């Protein structure tokens, strides 16, 4: 029985030659060894197929992770932008709260000056004629709906005025604020004859910064005839400003500028007798006296 089981584990191979005189050869081999020899070259193929499959799977996972990373990066950038906007809005809100505090103080002064409640016979409380206050159910003096509405209207006007002032040329274009030649008819320093001066000349040294006097867009930045190096800024449909005789021009056509931004430096280019800034304010296409707008914020010197 054991012998038969051993034979079953062996495979017999017979080698027959074409030559009849040759001896027939037989040899036996363990069938498990034969199976192992057959399987030996198959194992690397299977391993290669498995490696390719795992590589493709890993690459797919990497691509998915990369796509998710890009999405998260975009979300992070958007959050940073939103944070910047919120910080800016917070700053604007703080500024508005300061304005509201000032308005509230003015409103309190106004309320203190209103007529007081009188008590006629019978003990009933009534308001003097023309007041904007009313008596609540518990007998307290409170602002009327009309007064609250006026308060809201005041805030609206302040907001509109603040926006309008940003585009109105009220700031000084350079420092110091000394005017050497006024607006209007004057004696021309180069030909000793009367001529109309469409702006003002402001004293300055070479290289002194020149500032935009209101928010706007640069419409000209080049050498402009007798003005020399000059800049024009359009602030609104109403106002435009011109800055002449500059040494350097720091802006280009199309640039958006804010009130107080440096746009150039004082020089003596063009028709000029020395370093100074020629500054013009144009309203509805006509030059006007810039000093009218400076008076909104402070005094100036005239030589």
Image: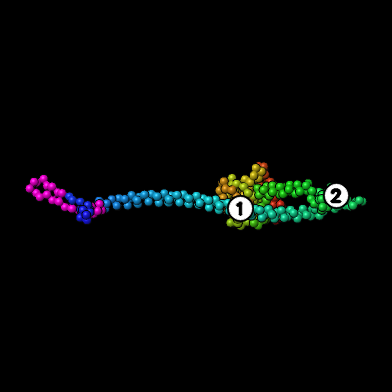
What residue is drawn where x is 78% and y is 54%?
A: 108
> Where does the image place residue 207, in percent across and percent down from the top left?
58, 56
- Of marks 2 and 1, which one's residue comes earlier in the chain? 1
Question: Taking 300 as reference, is 160 above or below it?
Answer: above
Does 284 sit above or below residue 51? Answer: above
The residue lying at 69 percent from left, 54 percent from top is: 97
On the image, which quarter does residue 109 sit in?
A: bottom right
Q: Is 20 within the magenta?
A: yes
The quarter of the image holding the N terminus is: bottom left
Residue under the point 80% across and 51% down = 142
**Secondary structure of the residue carrying numbered label 2:** loop
Residue 130 shows up from this direction: yes
Q: Residues within 10 Å of mark 1 (few under 14, many from 20)?
A: few
Identify the image's colour scheme: rainbow, by chain, secondary structure or one colour: rainbow
Instruction: Depth check: give the residue in front, 82 or 36.
Output: 36
Of 15 and 90, the residue lying toward us: 15
Q: Which residue lies under the disc numbered 1?
A: 86
Q: In this view of the protein, can residue 180 be seen by the observer?
A: no
Q: What whole-number distance in Å separates the C-alpha atoms at marks 2 and 1?
A: 46 Å
Q: Nearer the viewer, residue 187 or 59?
A: 59
Image coords of residue 280 (percent x, y)? 65, 48
User: In what element is the residue under mark 1?
Assistant: helix
Residue range (magenta): 14-37
Residue 55, given in percent of the width and then of the height, sits at 37, 51
Numbered circle sitting on residue 127: 2
């Amino acid at each position: 029985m054991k012998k038969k089981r051993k034979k079953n584990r062996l495979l017999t191979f017979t080698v027959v030659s074409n030559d009849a005189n040759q001896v027939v050869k037989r040899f036996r081999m363990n069938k498990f060894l034969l199976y192992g020899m057959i399987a030996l070259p198959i194992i690397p193929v299977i391993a290669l197929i498995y490696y390719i499959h795992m590589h493709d799977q890993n690459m797919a996972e990497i691509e998915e992770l990369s796509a998710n990373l890009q999405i998260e990066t975009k979300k992070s950038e958007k959050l940073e932008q939103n944070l910047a906007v919120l910080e800016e809005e917070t700053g604007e809100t703080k500024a508005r709260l300061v304005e509201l505090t000032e308005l509230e103080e003015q409103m309190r002064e106004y309320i203190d000056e209103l007529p007081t409640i009188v008590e006629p016979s019978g003990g009933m409380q009534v308001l003097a004629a023309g007041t904007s206050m009313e008596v609540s159910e518990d007998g307290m003096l409170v602002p009327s709906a009309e007064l609250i509405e006026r308060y809201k209207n005041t805030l609206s006007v302040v907001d509109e005025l603040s926006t309008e002032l940003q585009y109105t040329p009220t700031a000084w274009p350079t420092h110091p604020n000394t005017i050497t030649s006024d607006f209007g008819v004057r004696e021309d320093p180069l030909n000793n004859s009367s001529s109309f001066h469409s702006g003002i000349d402001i004293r300055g040294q070479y290289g002194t910064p020149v500032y935009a006097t209101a928010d706007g867009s640069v419409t000209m930045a080049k050498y402009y005839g007798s003005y020399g190096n000059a800049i024009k800024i359009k602030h609104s449909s109403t106002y435009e400003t011109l800055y002449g005789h500059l040494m350097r021009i720091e802006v280009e056509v199309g640039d958006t500028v804010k009130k107080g931004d440096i746009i150039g430096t004082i020089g003596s280019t063009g028709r000029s007798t020395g370093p100074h800034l020629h500054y013009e304010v144009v309203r509805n296409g006509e030059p006007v006296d810039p000093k009218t707008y400076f008076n909104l914020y402070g005094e100036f010197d005239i030589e």
